[in-house]
Image (cartoon, helix red, strand yellow):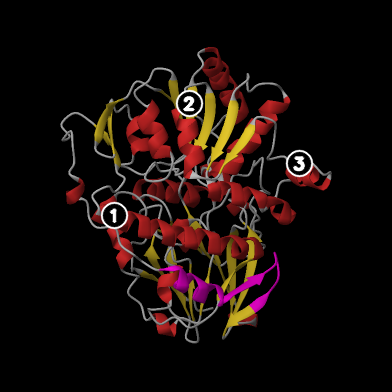
């Protein structure tokens, strides 16, 4: 059995910018075309798509609609791509909202940069300059506009879970639930037939095995080659923390001190995971009188989609919806969908819980909430999940005493708490359990979507547990020989 040629065009040694090329002698398939996220300098890399002939790509397959997996899809059309895009029904419903939101943000950032008011935030450590001139920041790029999004959506096709379809000559596609966020899928590509058949599986982002909101990730019956994410591949947890217990302890203390609790969050995934936990606490009267504000119009819209895709959800959440309940709503939850509303809750000084975008603290309402509260002792900041090196969240986690937000250097007096157990990514044991669930073991595992340190540690764990070949390629390094 010949193997296809597989090339990581992004997310090789980092956790954003996912893009994988799979080639046979008859077809070229690209899985995900994501944005690079992080510092303004790192995001300049988004200006250029991976250097391949996009006019020769037969199809693009999208695992899910996080921007680091879908954010450069509209750029492929001007680059010459003319084929179909395949994804799940839930992802197709969310994709235009995510991409149009990104297009609008690009325009806003460009306008603000040219007018000298571009939002900017960073943590400051000893030896760092106290101020960075905004003029020294690279000009934010315009990667695509709404017309590109509309054209792209005309190419989008969907498959249900487990449905098999030929998407290119000699290549059949099937989606498996990845348990990461709404619509997230692993991509199973069956190449050839009979004795010459080869099954390539791109895991996408895999959720934890124990997931309060989504079904656990599904292992395929067979996979000859796996392109496997490794975001949390270095994290091993012997005791899994209960996020609700952690939240309850923090909120009890915050309520006693009439403190404001700020939670940077992502509109898809993290927001709903936290709201579900807070809803459970509300049923037990463990919000201690604190109102909860969901300050993200995108998160509000995404949350409203959950009842339409029950087959993606955990048994308990699905049963609640089917019983006529809404497990992501509760008394005391207030939805914030405009900047005017967001500024109003920012300027009110009272105890509250505010979930605000963006999760990396690089844009959105979380910046003005932090600017108004980070220097106050009656403010708490809850961090969860991954924060890129150089981000405000990463700096706060490492004990930064100063932050710069929109040109103002502010002392950090707020308490900083971390909550474990809310990551949408499975840890090392979760990923190994997923691998164990594959009946016919792979011959090769190719690790992507992880730092080089995480990939190295996880590669050793796979070799010890599974005993197969594990590759840790860099960007552009080809693996295998074309079928």
Viewer can see residue 446: no
Q: Which residue is mark 2?
A: 348
Q: Quadrant of residue 288?
A: top right
Image height of 330 relative to 220, above or below: above
Instruction: Report whether 107 appears left or right of 3.
Output: left
Residue situated in front as seen by the camera: 12 or 180: 180
Circle 3: is it few (<14), some (14-19), or many (20+) Cα within 10 Å?
some
Residue extent of the magenta highlight: 145-165
Q: How far across and down, in percent of the image, does residue 185 sit? A: 60, 60
User: Mark 3 and 1 residues: CB-CB less than 8 Å, in contact?
Assistant: no
User: Mark 2 and 1 residues: CB-CB less than 8 Å, in contact?
Assistant: no
Distance in Å between CA atoms under marks 2 and 3 = 36 Å
Q: Which residue is mark 1?
A: 42
Distance in Å between CA atoms under marks 3 and 1 = 40 Å
Element at label 2: loop
Distance in Å between CA atoms under marks 2 and 1 = 36 Å
Image height of 183 relative to 328, above or below: below
Quadrant where the N terminus is found in the figure: bottom right
Circle 2: is it few (<14), some (14-19), or many (20+) Cα within 10 Å?
few
Question: What residue lies at 66% left-to-right and 50% top-to-bottom?
Answer: 304
Circle 1: is it few (<14), some (14-19), or many (20+) Cα within 10 Å?
few
Q: How far across and down, in percent of the image, does residue 110 sit? A: 30, 58
**Magenta stretch: includes residue 161:** yes
Viewer can see residue 367: yes
Which mark is nearer the camera, 2 or 1? 2
**Magenta stretch: includes residue 347:** no
Q: Which residue is mark 3?
A: 316
Sooner in the amino-acid sequence: mark 2 or mark 1:
1
Which mark is nearer the camera, 2 or 3? 2
Sooner in the amino-acid sequence: mark 3 or mark 1:
1
Sooner in the amino-acid sequence: mark 2 or mark 3:
3
Q: Residue furthest toward the top?
A: 256
């Amino acid at each position: 059995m010949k193997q296809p040629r597989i090339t990581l065009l992004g997310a090789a040694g980092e956790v954003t910018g996912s893009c994988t090329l799979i080639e046979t002698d008859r077809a070229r398939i690209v899985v995900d075309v994501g944005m690079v996220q992080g510092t303004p300098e790192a995001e300049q890399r988004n200006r250029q798509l991976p250097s391949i002939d996009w006019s020769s790509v037969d199809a693009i397959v999208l695992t899910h609609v996080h921007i680091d997996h879908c954010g450069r899809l509209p750029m492929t059309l001007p680059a010459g791509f003319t084929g179909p895009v395949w994804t799940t029904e839930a992802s197709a419903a969310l994709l235009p909202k995510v991409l149009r939101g990104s297009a609008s943000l690009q325009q806003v950032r460009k306008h603000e940069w040219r007018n000298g008011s571009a939002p900017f935030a960073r943590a400051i450590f000893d030896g760092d300059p106290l101020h960075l001139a905004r003029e020294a920041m690279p000009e934010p790029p315009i990667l695509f506009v709404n017309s590109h999004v509309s054209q792209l959506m005309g190419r989008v096709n969907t498959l249900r879970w487990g449905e098999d379809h030929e998407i290119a000559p000699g290549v059949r596609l099937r989606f498996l639930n990845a348990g990461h966020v709404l619509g997230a899928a692993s991509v199973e590509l069956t190449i050839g037939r009979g004795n010459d058949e080869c099954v390539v599986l791109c895991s996408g982002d895999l959720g934890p095995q124990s997931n309060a909101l989504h079904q656990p990730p599904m292992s395929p019956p067979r996979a000859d080659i796996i392109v496997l994410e490794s975001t949390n591949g270095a994290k091993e947890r012997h005791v899994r923390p209960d996020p609700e217990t952690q939240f309850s302890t923090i909120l009890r203390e915050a309520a006693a001190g009439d403190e404001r609790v700020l939670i940077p969050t992502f509109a898809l995934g993290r927001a709903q995971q936290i709201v579900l936990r807070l809803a459970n606490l509300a049923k037990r009267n463990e919000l201690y009188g604190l109102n909860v504000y969901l300050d993200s119009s995108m998160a509000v819209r995404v949350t409203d989609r959950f009842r339409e895709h029950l087959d993606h959800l955990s048994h308990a959440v699905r049963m609640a919806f089917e019983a006529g309940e809404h497990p992501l709503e509760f008394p005391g939850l207030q939805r914030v969908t405009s900047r005017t509303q967001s500024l109003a809750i920012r300027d009110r000084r009272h105890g509250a819980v505010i979930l605000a975008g963006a999760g990396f603290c690089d844009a959105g309402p979380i910046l003005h909430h932090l600017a108004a509260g980070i220097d106050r002792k009656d403010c708490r900041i809850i961090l969860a999940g991954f924060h890129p090196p150089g981000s405000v969240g990463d700096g706060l986690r490492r004990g930064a005493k100063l932050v710069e937000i929109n040109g103002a250097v502010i002392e950090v007096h707020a308490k900083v708490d971390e909550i474990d157990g809310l990551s949408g990514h499975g840890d090392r044991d979760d990923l190994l359990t997923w691998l164990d669930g594959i009946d016919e073991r792979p011959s090769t595992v190719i690790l992507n979507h992880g730092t080089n340190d995480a990939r190295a540690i996880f590669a050793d764990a796979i070799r010890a547990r599974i005993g197969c070949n594990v590759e840790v390629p860099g960007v552009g390094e080809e693996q295998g020989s074309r079928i």
